[in-house]
Amino acid sequence: MANYFNTLPLREKLNQLGVCDFMDSSEFLDGVNALKGKKLVIVGCGAQGLNQGLNLRDSGLDVSYTLRAEAIEGKRDSWKNATENNFKVGTYEELIPTADVVINLTPDKQHTAVVSAIMPLMKEGATLSYSHGFNIVEEGTQIRKDLTVIMVAPKCPGSEVRAEYVRGFGVPTLIAVHPENDPQGKGLAQAKAYAVGTGGHKAGVLKSSFVAEVKSDLMGEQTILCGLLQTGSILSFDKMVEKGIDAGYASKLVQYGVEVITEALKQGGITAMMDRLSNVAKIKAFEISEELKDIMRPLFQKHQDDIMSGEFSRIMMEDWANGDKNLLAWRAETGETAFEKTPAGDVKIGEQEYFDNYTLMVAFVRAGVELAFETMVQAGIKPESAYYESLHETPLIANTIARKKLFEMNRVISDTAEYGCYLFDQACKPLLADFMKKVDTDLVGKNFNEGKDGGVDNRTLIAVNEAIRTHQVEQIGATLRKAMTAMKAIKTA
Amino acid sequence: MQPLVNIQNLNLKYQQKQVLVDLNWTIQHGENWQLGGVSGSGKTSLAKIIARKQTAIGDVKINFNTASELPAEVLFVESWYQFKNVEGVANFYYQQRYTSQQAKNSLTVHAELVSYGKENNLHLDQVEPILEALNFSTFASSQLIELSSGEHKKLQLVKALWLKPQLLIIDQPYTGLDVASRKSLNILLDKAAAAGVQLILICNDTALPTSINRFAEIKDGKLVAVDSFERSSHTENRLKEIPDFLKQSPLYSSQNIVKMVDVNISYGEKQVLKNINWEVKAGEKWLLQGHNGSGKSTLLSLINGDHPQSYANELYLFGNKRGSGESIWDIKKRIGLISPEFHWYFDASATVWQSIASGFYDSVGLFQQLPYSKAAQVDELIEYFALTESKNELLNHLPLGKQRMVLLARTIIKNPELLILDEPCQGLDQQQTQHFNQLVDALCANGMTVIYVGHFESQLPKSLTHKLVLSQGEAIENTKAYTIQKELA
């Protein structure tokens, strides 16, 4: 199978990359009607599978699950999840031929196997839905021409998808129709109805394409979302310990700091996050984040280039074929870092203290978000897409670090994201070695304002504020955040 | 001997309001107090100050008995239970406990007790009799997320009685407990008192442990000793005229509000509801009773569209078979619901106004702009409930009783066909309870259908006419033409 994106002429590449429209709520007035009375069969019953299915059923749709025969016979967790919540469960042979819509919610890595098993069983003219486009775009899987192929991707973990639905809201969702597979022209109507069924239309729906979703998703998760948060956390912890800060304190500051800091990001973008610092600290954070951007720019560009050319997926699929040799080795290595092994100390850290004593992370986050955003936009991805895959998702990932450090982050994200995260981390740490030599405890571990008189030059401050506020990620962010009316505050420890 | 607690000139300001004013309180050894009075008078704040969980201006001295074997500690049991998942965050949602998920989220009761015991050097064999007495032993393997609010209350009490601190302050000790459990709790508290634990119970109840020998309330920021709370402030308040928009009779699309045919609910081996057959017709007013764990919440979750297993049962709501293409929002729009759990899970970041307005959309928190007419109704109801002053405050900044009033207003704002009131008056003072029940009576007079859960006959609205009693998941009484008056006589 050939990489789908690479088979396209340049004009079509640009055309598909450059799709991302925030849909008006009037687009969803038809509710779930396009799926009403249709048989929806979900493949897989993990966190996304179960929670999306619960939502779709509670929206009045007919939902059942199909699992591999071994999972049913072995009464595995996926089988229990489905049957104990009173869903009908059957094998592929039993249920796929009856389905009007087959919703594939298995892990990326299984897609080729799953799709090649179910495709021959699907009835003429049915719909196949994905929540991630990797299989279509990177692996180049060809879907039978009579079938419609859509994507509905809630931009949150499965548990959030459910929690937000039952409180009467939803999570931001991305939808797409694969242009090679829309023979009856019904794809978009069905994708919209699906988004209504999971509650996504209340939080905001972006119309994207399979290509734009994959290329931006991979870039975001590898660089700012997982990669840089991991690198920044480990370097910060090691620096504090090296400089004699109590290890328990350092561990707590790093584990929860990134969540508290990015909560401000979620509410009001880079501007709000930087405004939480004193003027002196803000100027310093600005200066070092500019320096970080210069150092890391080539690495961000390399990741984007490899994603666009298909090189990234080629080497990752090589690793799949190799029994996940690299993935497992890197995972073990992450589990052995000092940060991971030092429990958070029993110390109280105030909300403001997380900003004042962890200015370095503020700088990392600004540098990472802006770089990822800039690099994606330069590569032809629309700013809306780039915003979601950088700034928007950062607090969600930070939340997983607060739960159980990097182990938890890497457990929650997909294997693809995890692989890309390690790849970035391996390259980024040596790149920052010289930079980190200059970093002292005023930037990480102690209050930056301590012993400083707090005075700043007006003109410098004005210039810094101007640079932060007029960045494109801030402008598009303000528009999109306004459209997503409500945001839940994360409870901090 | 020095008094156990000696408070001099205590002052506390909350925002612009002076809550405690030069308050003095001396608690001698051997004294056990009931602290009562109206909601919002500062009882909980005072308790938190004594337990050093809140700061205030003034002098608070605690003189522990150094000869005692009991821990020299003040334990404050909050009226609100807290629990976290295994990853240390409290990010749960209301309907979660009804959904079966293989990824286990929270600790079991047993594991929680083991860790509590370890933290406080307590022996596990000493907790057994307390668990027995509160009828809680069977919950050892239950996950915390699976417990009902009454069961969470029991877990809090079990821990406190196990620890036996020298001073034990319990805020609302009886909320959510059934009649039998309240009696057992009083016996346990008397035993603890006999062993040297001194008690402060914050509540307005009258069936207290016999060891309670002092009574006080907070009036105008000062502590005032009273003889007791035996029906002390029994003033018959006339109900204000209810807002016009609540006077309209609901338009019923079907006379059959609820119909259950042999309904069974179980989790693995554990059966929670057994062969329930129950019909609620339009305009009927039902009392639902049963001890803690009898299945009341589960029964109500079926009606409110919150239970995944409703799809596998023969259940009709508002004339439609459940699972025939309706969404849970089609069901919820006809229902106004309040329960202790619903309150617990409510959106902490919503203001009073937003909380009430969200009742129009059945959402937890407000995500939509209200049209003018609806916004006006919210204002009218806020005025009616005397909440105007707090309308822009965050819900969780209000005292618990007031929070409950807000959610009660939310429950009735859309004048629904069916009101589900699951212990609606928990945490309210006598006057608030009476006022709310009068309001329910007024709504009933307009033809609304009601299902009301309450443990105490004296605290029920007068209009209830039917009664369903559950015991261990079975309906043991299903009576029409039930009247409270008859029961009281």
Image (tube, coloured by chain):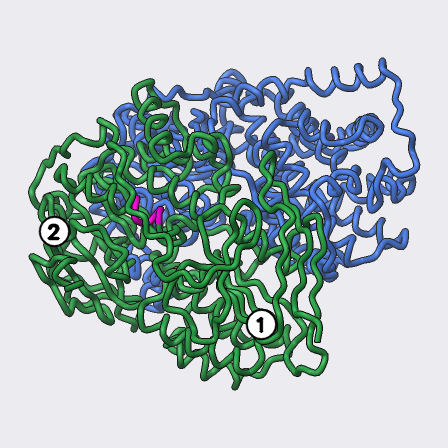
Chain bearing mark 1: B
Mark 2 highlights which residue? B280
Asked if one can make out residue B318 in the rendered structure from this viewpoint, the answer is yes
Percent x, y of residue A80? 34, 63
Percent x, y of residue A347? 74, 56
Q: Nearer the viewer, residue A328 or B123?
A: B123
| Inter-mark Cα distance, 2 to 1 | 44 Å
| Element at label 1 | helix
Percent x, y of residue A139? 49, 40
Q: Is residue A454 above or below residue A335?
A: above
Q: Nearer the viewer, residue B282 or B33?
A: B33
Q: Which is the main secondary structure of the residues drawn in magenta?
A: helix
Mark 2 touches mark 1? (CB < 8 Å): no
Q: Amino acid at mark 1?
A: Tyr
User: In which quadrant is the C terminus of chain B drawn?
Assistant: bottom left
Co-location on one chain, circles 2 and 1: yes
Q: Residues within 10 Å of mark 2 (few under 14, many from 20)?
A: many
Chain-order first, disc 2 or disc 1:
1
User: From the viewer's perspective, is A290 left or right of B178?
Assistant: right
Chain painted in blue in the figure: A
Mark 1 highlights which residue? B116
Q: Amino acid at mark 2?
A: Val
Q: Is residue B93 above or below residue B380?
A: below
